[in-house]
Image (spheres, coloured by chain):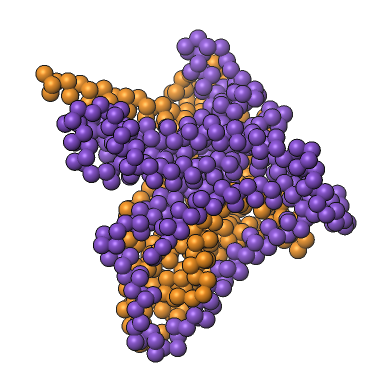
Amino acid sequence: MSKMFNYLSSAAVTLFAILLLCALLFPLFWILSSSIRPYSTLFTTELRLIPKDATLEAYHWVLFESKFFLYAKNSMVVYGAALFSSLIVTIPAAYGFSRFNFLGRDILLNSYFVLAQIMSGMSIIGLLGLYLFLVKIGLVNSRIIVGLIYGASTVPYVTWYLKTYFDSIPLEYDEAAFLDGASFLQNILHVIVPIAKPGIFVAIIFISIFTWSEWVIAGILLGSGHFTLPVALTTLQGRWETPWNRFAAMSILYSIPLVILFMLSRRHIEKGMSASGLKG
Amino acid sequence: MISKSQPEWLSALNIIKSYKLYVQTTRPPNQQPAAAMQVDTIHTMSKPTMKSSPLWRPHTAYLLILPSLLLFLFFFLYPILFSVYISTTNASFYNFIKGFNWIGLDNYKSLLLKGDFFKPLGRTLLFVLTSVPLKVIAGTSVAGLFSSPKLKLKSILYPLYLAPWSLPWFFVVMIWRGMFNQDFGAINQLLSTIGISSINWLNNPINAFISYNIVEVYLVYPFMTTIILAAIENIPREVLESAIIDGATAWERFRYIVLPLIQKPLLWATLITTIASYMIFGVPYILNKGGPAGINEFLLIYGYKKAFVLGRYGFASAFMVLVFFILIFLVIPYSKMTNIAERGY
């Protein structure tokens, strides 16, 4: 009898969890179904997840008639600059924090840790100053500068994360390299970076996620010819003439690279986290 | 790094990692993983090869750190100092190039005395007071669901529950903007099937405020759930089992056993969410730009509009400086908790 009760209550809880999941994932189904809806059936009051006359018209518009590839190219330029500038400065810095004890080390690490959590709000608080400063020195509307700003804003987190990762690499590796006559930079490049690959991969994912979604800074600093994808999407939807199905298709295409990266990286993230001793 | 130009869900990603480190470093020393132990030895033990080599001098460390510091300070510290200066001038879109004047603390006076600062501050506090409890309750409920031994298929369901998290935050908010649309939005379509006539979600002050809360909870629950579930799973099984044997109901077990034991991580996550909600920007801005008619302009939206829509640079800078001061007070308790985490590593 009690076994029967256990079985039933277990089934009820699981069923509830599945129903709740459907509600939580509903927005995703809805955007997918919106993107294959023909324009004429857009403004219906009835809900239909699988539209009657499904069509790829909206995707055709995004790929062949809109400026999607221009925006995608801009996003890639910004992304490349951000990734490069961030890694090239944070890897040596993280190594310095990991291997040396120097005046100001703990204060810097602590402030990096706190800054990392409030960085996004801080970037809006400081955006006006940044904008005016760039106007003064004549560097607005440059994709490379926006990339460098993104790179700079990932410095606290990436330095902090890579430092904890480098901590797990035994000092014997460095010593062996120095005995062979390597310099610090050679040691970092040829010994530390290859060992720390999983950790660096996690850092890359973090930088990618941030860079691919950022739209506030880019929206202020870039002109319409240099719009990145998220900035273009905000302006697209601001105008009434962009139908929702086209908008849906473009935003789906925009998010696909990141989703793929996320799927590819799941194993690396876990590996990176466990190898750095970050597993709680 | 959390909310708002930067997606909250991904900020959560790094917070979780920080949190795991926090758990790890606050553990008693004999439970420290080998890797963490080793860190200490690097800095405390004097290795002969290190001592004798002139390479390991502190100035090498400064050289290694300098480029990252320069990049960061150039794009962050300097602009903030610059906006402190601008806040004491009458700079605006019209006179910024031609030349503007120093006006002392006039901007601050008009913000604090005319009350321009307190309206957005009040709205923001109202939002923090509604959304933080909702986020904590939602996250704890889902965590409670997944800690229940009655729930089957956990390994399939859990990643799917966190799925909204693996999408660009920006994309998710955009979807919700469509969902709330009065004419073709799914919410009104759903409501009409149960006979409720269409609701104007984004052009009504109260409905818009409710919409922000819904979207924010949707974005933040995976973060809360992950942290709280990790804390619940750290509770020894025997404690809960003995409580079941003693006849405690599910609620009693939660209230008197689980809640006291997860107090610290819960407080930690609540604190982070509070800071993030204080700096809310993205969700209301994307949904309806803090509308209708600016009635839901929170602190950062108000400052952003004054700066980039109206071009009142001096005024907006002063406003942002005030926002920053309050932020420092919010961050102090958080950084104290962080210092605990950093100690001994």
Q: Residue at x 34, y 78 (%)?
A: B45
The chain letter corresponding to purple is B
Q: Is residue A272 left or right of residue B337?
A: left
Q: Residue at x 46, y 79 (%)?
A: A185
- The image position of residue B143, as x and y in percent, is 34, 36
The chain letter corresponding to orange is A
Foreground residue, A271 or B33?
B33
- The image position of residue B79, as x and y in percent, is 69, 59
Q: Is residue A52 left or right of residue B49?
A: right
**Is residue A62 something one can see in this rendering?**
no
**Is residue B70 something one can see in this rendering?**
yes
Q: Quadrant of residue B78?
A: bottom right
Q: Residue at x 34, y 76 (%)?
A: A171
- The image position of residue B43, as x and y in percent, is 39, 75
Look at the picture and state if B101 lies above or below B267. below
- The image position of residue A66, as x and y in percent, is 62, 41
Q: Is residue A107 left or right of residue A3?
A: right
Look at the picture and state if A67 lies above or below A81. above
Look at the picture and state if A169 lies above or below B231. below
Q: Residue at x 21, y 34 (%)?
A: B243
Foreground residue, B179 or B66?
B66
Q: Which quadrant holds the C terminus of chain B?
A: bottom left
- Find the residue positioned furthest to the top: B195
| Total numbered circles | 0
Q: Quadrant of residue A277?
A: bottom left
